[in-house]
Amino acid sequence: MVVAASAVVTDDQGRILLQRRRDNDLWALPGGGMEMTESLPGCAVREVKEETGLDVEVTGLVGTYTDPRHVIAYSDGEVRRQFNICFRARVTGGELTLSDESTELRWVAPTDLDALPMHHTQRLRLHHAMENRPEPYLG
């Protein structure tokens, strides 16, 4: 099991920042595994910076995602169950820059999300973020 953080980063127009992942060609939120020296919000901030070039500030919590059926098999042979905390965030600086983990970065209008290929767990996080729930999703 790998503890990870992801972020729903939105712009002033309400669009969401997504990356097209190089390893599976699917669209996803920026995010990744937490390092021993950081907090979960700090992990989200670092991952967004590494994967998109943008500096962000965490503004809230979308939810916790711990489905034991979410097992990821990577092309390098690694297999793991992911434990993800998904945050809301806003841009505070930086410049949109493609990393070696992605083939494309895009600001996507919520109405265009359904047309993009993505893993069902990413879609669930986005769905919960769009609902503007008064309480975070706990699952």
Image: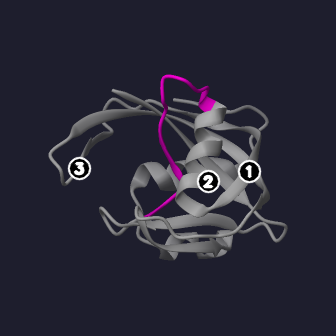
- The percent position of residue 102, horizontal first and vertical second, equals 43, 67
Q: Residue 130: give its label.
A: none
Q: How is the image coloured?
A: one colour
Instruction: Identify residue for label 2.
Output: 49
Residue 31 colored magenta? yes
Which quadrant would the N terminus be assigned to in this image? Answer: top left
The residue segment tinted magenta is: 27-40
Mark 1 surroundings within 10 Å by alpha-carbon count, few (fewer than 14), some (14 through 19), many (20 or more):
many
Horizontal side, residue 13 vs residue 106: left or right: right
Instruction: Identify residue for label 3.
Output: 74
- The percent position of residue 86, horizontal first and vertical second, equals 59, 40
User: Is label 2 in a helix, a strand or a loop?
Assistant: helix
Mark 2 and mark 1: Cα distance apart in space: 8 Å
At x 23%, y 49%, the residue is 74
Question: Disc 2 marks which amino acid?
Answer: Lys
Residue 29 colored magenta? yes
- The percent position of residue 138, horizontal first and vertical second, equals 58, 28
Question: Disc 3 marks which amino acid?
Answer: Tyr
Verify CB contact (< 8 Å) between mark 3 and mark 1.
Answer: no
The mark that comes first in sequence, 2 or 3, is: 2
The mark that comes first in sequence, 2 or 1, is: 2
Q: Where 122 falls versus 22 (above or below)?
A: above
Horizontal side, residue 35 vs residue 67: left or right: right
| Residue 126 can be seen, yes or no | no
Instruction: Identify residue for label 1.
Output: 56
The answer to which quarter of the image holds residue 78 is top left
Horizontal side, residue 102 vs residue 132: left or right: left
